[in-house]
Amino acid sequence: MKNKRIIQIGAGAAVLLMLLFTVTRLSDDTRHFLDVETSLALEQLQEENVEKAQIDDREQTLRLELREPITVDEQEGVDSVIAQYPARSAPEVFGAVQDGKVDEYDTNVTSDSFLMSMLSFMLPMLLLFGLLFFFLTRMQKGSMLGIGGNKAKELTKDMPTNTFQDVAGADEAVDELHEIKDFLEDPTRYHELGAKIPRGVLLYGPPGTGKTLLARAVAGEAGVPFYTISGSDFVEMFVGVGASRVRDLFKTAKENSPCIIFIDEIDAVGRQRGSGTGGGHDEREQTLNQMLVEMDGFGDREGVILIAATNRPDILDPALLRPGRFDRQIPVTPPDLKGREAILRVHSEGKPLAKHVDVTQLAKRTAGMSGADLANVLNEAALLTARIGGNVITADALEEATDRVVGGPRRSSKVISEHEKKVTAYHEGGHTLAAWALRDIERVYKVTILARGRTGGHAMTAQEDDKGMYNREEMFARLVFAMGGRAAEELVFGTPTTGASSDIEQATKIARAMITEYGFSPALGTVKYGEEQGDPFSGRGGGGTSGYSEQVAQTIDQELQFLLDNAHRKAYSILSEHRGYLDKLALQLLEKETLRRPDLEAIFDGIDPQRVDIFDTDVRFPQQAGFEPVKTPAELAKERGEEPPKRLSLLEASLLARQRRQQAQAQAQKGGNATGAGAGSGEHSVEEGEIGLIFGENNAVGVTGLPKLEEIQALEELEAAADKQTEKQAETPEQKAESNTGSEDSEQSGKHRKAEQNETARGTETRKENQHNGEHYDD
């Protein structure tokens, strides 16, 4: 804002100077005089052709208005001329004017002193240079013309911001960042425990997962100055500019501490040093060195919190990631099923959804999508509804929008021959039937032969839950699913087409990962083959070696061919065995073009899914006979017909503690200091047993039957009331009555404690039973 004000003042001053210059030029009365040689002017005087003359001794000029126009340098009709003369020739000029029989003449004699003449000449120049120096010194903030100045933008209360209520599907990240807000609002609780606020927070994750949205939410919630800048703003073509901007940014932040700095895409400036071809004098490295010093050097950085975001944490310099600079590194991953549902509900606010729209089913069909993808799905659905003139967003519009985001817009205008339609129907039917006949892969929920994007059709599967691990059979089932289209073309038409190119590419990637990354090949064992290719710009070196010998490479190729050939044969076997179902499905696709789960269930009624395993020959590590895996506490509780045990996670405990503090603050505002005195006491803190529950200690109590949040709050209120009543002295009957009431409350509170102890005992029995069955690990 200050620079904008300076620019406005400078522009006004420049306009004023231009106006003064224009007025001066317009007021010049010599503009219609033609500048000629002195000899020509004296000649006109001698020929008595001058009607009026003016001698300016200050400017040493002679102005003549002629009786008869003359021609000067082929310019005709000249009746006014002006000529210069030297100071020593002034007497001769005066004499010529007197002898030239001029009707009227006058003189302009110099009256200003030499000093005044110099001031009239130098003052405009001094004013101009003074304004220029003033603008440069006020706007540069680091170097000339502001090149090295701070480009960070300060978010004000007038700017649109987000809050933590606008962020869904990233509860853990929100809770970690919420701690910064709590520390800035009330640092006493942390100081009492000897805790220090994190000085740096790094948000990393794939694109579109909400890293920048989280930063905007922090800006809207923090209540302190918030400066935002991009990593690319530190990079310029001039040497030293990046380091200068870093110094100026942290200087501004220290002057306004406590405050928060957010650097988006920090990998633009924080790449690992020693990379590239610039050596130690690389401008990017100098900028990074200055940032490292400002983040945790000899200088004081108290009250300045740095938040950065990147989707490439692997290429950042290790010195940038160490504690003291980025104390906390928060992963922002794609949301799970619950998170996707929450994100869809947030972005559906303000959009008229039809009553039959099931957001939960939509969340299941969008597995793997980021928050940006889900927002795009709802926006595309709204656009499609507006395009066709609808009033509400229907489930069909949402399904079409999902397909558009995944596969691209539909190519309705493309002319497809009947034979190509038939090939596409059998191809997609092969994928669908192969998946439906296998037990280790998700069922297809939609298959279509409508061209979309670069594909002629697609068969889409949906996971019922978000899985984090896959076994060998599940991975091989995906190979069979990918090869189903090619197998159908060969089975029905006897020759393959180019339509399976993307299927082959996907199957090859899966098979290679099974061999070189997951250790699923008995011939190669549990070894990671292949190193990451060198990147001279990421600090990983410029080598391109594979990391294994030629014999190993040959074995990898053989195992790769073995997996793909077996998947191809298995897909062909499944389709040939269920040829009637394949023909029936292709016919339905040609008639309806798109089939969904109910249609597929009706067509494939009678197919018994089978399990596929080609790794039976690997007998080196068989499953031990006579032993079964231990059962989880949830499985044991289900067998007993009980509710599954609940473990208070760190996120739940943090939310519980935050709600307790908010409740205590609300009571303090209503009841004054007397009620708010217990806000920081033990009655609103997490007890020792609860801490064991949170961090999973072996000696924790109360694993089963953990009270709900409302029950815990009610119990605390009863305990607080009992403590207050017992402290009172029973001197009057009224006070005794109150004391009796307090005793009843205490008795009721004791009953609650006894019930909780019973639940604790049950949890101990459950834990002993698990220990008897075998060792238990938490994922």
Image: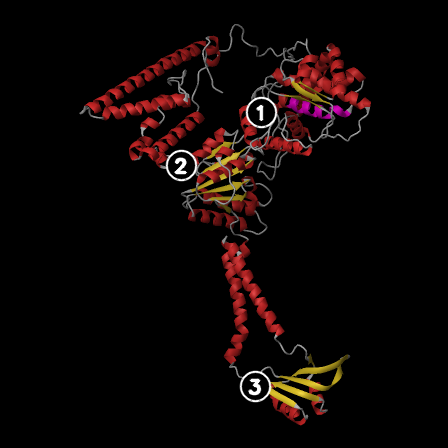
Q: Residue at x 55, y 48 (%)?
A: 281
For badge 2, the amino acid type reads Phe
Q: Amino acid at mark 3?
A: Val
Is residue 521 in view from this perspective? no
Residue 503 on the magenta span: yes
Callout in the foreground (3, 1): 1
Mark with earlier residue (2, 3): 3
Q: Nearer the viewer, mark 2 or mark 1?
A: 1
**Residue located at (51% from left, 7% from top):** 627
Q: Where does residue 87 sit, x and y in percent of width and height?
A: 60, 86
Q: Which residue is mark 3?
A: 109
Place of residue 394 in the rendered image (x, y in percent of width and height, measured from the top left): 63, 27
Whichever of callouts 3 and 1 sits on the residue coming sooner in the sequence is 3
Whether 17 is among the magenta residues is no
Chain part drawn in magenta: 498-512
Q: Residue 543, position in %: x, y?
A: 62, 35
- In the image, 205 versus 100, the foreground residue is 100
Quickly name the residue at label 1. Answer: 359
Q: Mark 2 — residue? A: 183
Query: Element at badge 2?
Result: helix
Give the CA distance from mark 2 to mark 1: 36 Å
Q: Please say if the residues under marks 2 and 3 sit with CB atoms less than 8 Å apart.
A: no
- Image quadrant assignment for residue 733: top left
